[in-house]
């Protein structure tokens, strides 16, 4: 990963990413460009390589071949599908995620997530939805250039899903670049601007979201949308 | 029924705060607590490093540490004796037959336990937290610090386990301390001496204190786990 930016409107570029494990090719020459300030959706069936690609782009997994250019790790954040929560209070967990935040700002973020009354509650005792909200505001509070979200609303109820989507939209309006995976078609249509469809570790189609959902060009894309 | 008599005498000695008895108990606690503290200060970061990083010699370190886990205390006492005796490489320190020598012996004795148990605790937590720490870009020092904090409940239990091993040890401290009255006599060495001299009441009183210490360790350990679980920090 380098801090080089290839073009003014492109914040991150992946070229020919290949990842093999135990003789199996998990990502096969994946190349993609993430537009600055966009919401890019990584779509695909289970095992297509969405989470792997997200982890590679964020630098959590090193690829066997290929290059990634984009903002430094310090300017990136990631929210995992299953939030990783420390054995601290809710407020202290947020402070751990964003050490530079002062108490007032932490309180304000918790208030926005309607969790200010849980500030002193053990973070691991929060519900799954609350933990996901906590992980999201922990990432947003750091104001990264690019935010990776791995199925951020999986297993969440309607209210929590709406909160996550609202926060994502607000971050996008503030200029943040967001790359997320999702299995929810309506959510993908609501949020997505660009779509990257993966199948068996390969990119099948890359297109603006409206065109992808209305007139997909690749047969696998049509098949995927038919089952979504 | 004879066994009850020394038991009664032991209780009255404890109740009256026998000076000799209290001095021995005080020295035992001081030596063992210091040794445990030193072993934790050295052992916990080592356990964290062994759990989180691959480096040349790591496996050898683990093998050596695990070997010392099963090392008889008298052998450790003998090695420390050879090191700190006047003709030994550390003889210039002049600590043979002093509480400092006993602290050193007990530290060496419980250090492998501290390393092995903390490595186990850290390995489990590191598997859970590694992606988050990597994503946050934490450096080596910050990762170890965060792991130590996250493992605090397990580490308290490790500290208590180390203390239990240190306070109940007799062979090593006997060799390097010499069991000198008013100087290096601790509970376990005193029990051995008093029993051999037929002072069963005194030995029994110290034995009761050791039992009490073991009981307290277990109660405190359970209370802490229960309390942390209620707070959600041990789930």
Image (spheres, rainbow, N blue to C red):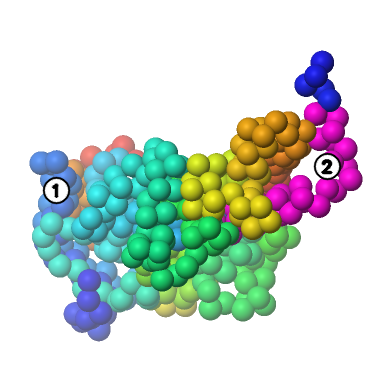
Please name the residue shown 78% across and 21% down the image. Answer: B3
Q: Is mark 1 on a helix, strand or loop?
A: strand
Which chain is mark 1 on?
A: A
Which is nearer the eye, B146 or B160? B160
Q: Which residue lies furthest to the bottom in this view?
A: A8
Q: Which residue is drawn at 71% across and 49% down?
A: B25
Q: In which quarter of the image is residue A77?
A: bottom left
Q: Nearer the viewer, residue A22 or A8?
A: A22
Q: Which chain does the residue under circle 2 lie in?
A: B
- Tell whether label 2 touches label 1 (CB within 8 Å): no
Where residue A210 appears, x then y in whole percent? Answer: 32, 59
Residue at image location 28% in from the left, 64% down from the top: A59
Q: What element carries label 2?
A: helix
Quadrant position of the C terminus of chain A in the picture: top left
Q: Could you confirm whether marks 1 and 2 are on the same chain?
A: no
For this view, does A8 lie left or right of residue B197? left
Image check: A189 left or right of A111?
left
Q: Which of A195 and B82 is in front in this view?
A: B82
Vertical order, A167 against A85 (above or below): below
Q: Which label was assigned to residue A185?
A: none
Q: In this view, does A138 lie to the left or right of A110?
A: left
Q: How far across and down, in percent of the image, does residue A155 sit? A: 50, 43
Residue B14 part of the magenta segment = yes
Task: Describe residue B161's horizontal placement relative to residue B3 as left or right.
Answer: left
Give the number of the disc on residue B14: 2
Magenta extent: B6-35
Q: Which residue is drawn at 42% across and 74% down?
A: A144
Q: Distance between the residues labelled 1 and 2?
A: 69 Å
Where residue A61 sits, quadrant-wise, is bottom left
Q: Specify the label residue A20 is tagged with.
A: 1
Front label number (1 vs 2): 2
Mark 1 burial class by Cα count in 10 Å: few <14, some 14-19, many 20+: few
């Amino acid at each position: 990963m380098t801090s080089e930016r290839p073009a003014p409107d492109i914040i991150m570029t992946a070229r020919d990413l290949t990842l093999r494990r135990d003789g199996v090719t998990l990502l096969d020459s994946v190349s993609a460009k993430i537009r600055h300030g966009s919401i890019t959706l990584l779509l695909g069936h289970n095992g297509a390589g969405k989470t792997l690609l997200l982890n590679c782009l964020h630098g959590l997994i090193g690829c066997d071949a290929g290059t990634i250019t984009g903002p430094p790790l310090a300017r990136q954040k990631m929210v995992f599908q299953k939030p990783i929560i420390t054995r601290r209070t809710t407020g202290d967990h947020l402070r751990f995620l964003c050490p530079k935040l002062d108490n007032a700002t932490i309180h304000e973020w918790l208030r926005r997530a309607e969790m200010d009354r849980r500030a002193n509650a053990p973070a691991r005792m929060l519900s799954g939805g609350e933990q996901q909200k906590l992980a999201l505001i922990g990432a947003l509070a750091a104001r990264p250039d690019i935010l990776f979200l791995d199925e951020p609303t999986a297993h969440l109820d309607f209210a929590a899903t709406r909160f996550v989507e609202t926060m994502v939209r607000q971050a996008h309006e503030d200029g943040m670049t967001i790359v997320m995976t999702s299995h929810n078609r309506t959510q993908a249509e609501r949020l997505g601007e660009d779509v990257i469809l993966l199948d068996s570790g390969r990119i099948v189609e890359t297109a603006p979201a409206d065109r992808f959902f209305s007139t997909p060009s690749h047969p696998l894309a049509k098949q995927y949308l038919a089952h979504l | 029924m004879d066994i009850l008599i020394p038991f009664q005498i032991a209780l009255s000695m404890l109740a009256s705060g026998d000076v000799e008895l209290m001095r021995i108990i005080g020295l035992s606690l001081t030596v063992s607590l210091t040794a445990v503290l030193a072993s934790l200060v050295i052992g916990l970061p080592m356990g964290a490093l062994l759990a989180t990083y691959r480096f040349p010699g790591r496996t050898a370190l683990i093998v050596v540490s695990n070997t010392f886990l099963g090392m008889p205390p008298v052998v450790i006492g003998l090695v420390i004796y050879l090191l700190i005796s006047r003709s030994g490489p550390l003889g210039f320190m002049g600590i043979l037959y002093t509480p400092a020598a006993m602290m050193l012996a007990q530290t060496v004795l419980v250090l492998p336990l501290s390393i092995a148990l903390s490595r186990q605790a850290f390995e489990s937590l590191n598997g859970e937290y590694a992606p988050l720490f990597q994503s946050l870009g934490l450096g080596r020092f910050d990762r170890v610090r965060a792991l130590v904090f996250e493992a605090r409940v397990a580490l308290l239990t490790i500290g208590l386990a180390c203390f239990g091993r240190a306070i109940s040890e007799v062979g090593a401290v006997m060799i390097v301390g010499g069991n000198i009255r008013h100087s290096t006599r601790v509970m376990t060495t005193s029990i051995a001496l008093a029993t051999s001299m037929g002072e069963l009441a005194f030995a029994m009183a110290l034995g009761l204190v050791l039992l009490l210490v073991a009981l307290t360790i277990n109660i405190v350990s359970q209370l802490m786990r229960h309390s942390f679980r209620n707070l959600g920090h041990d789930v």
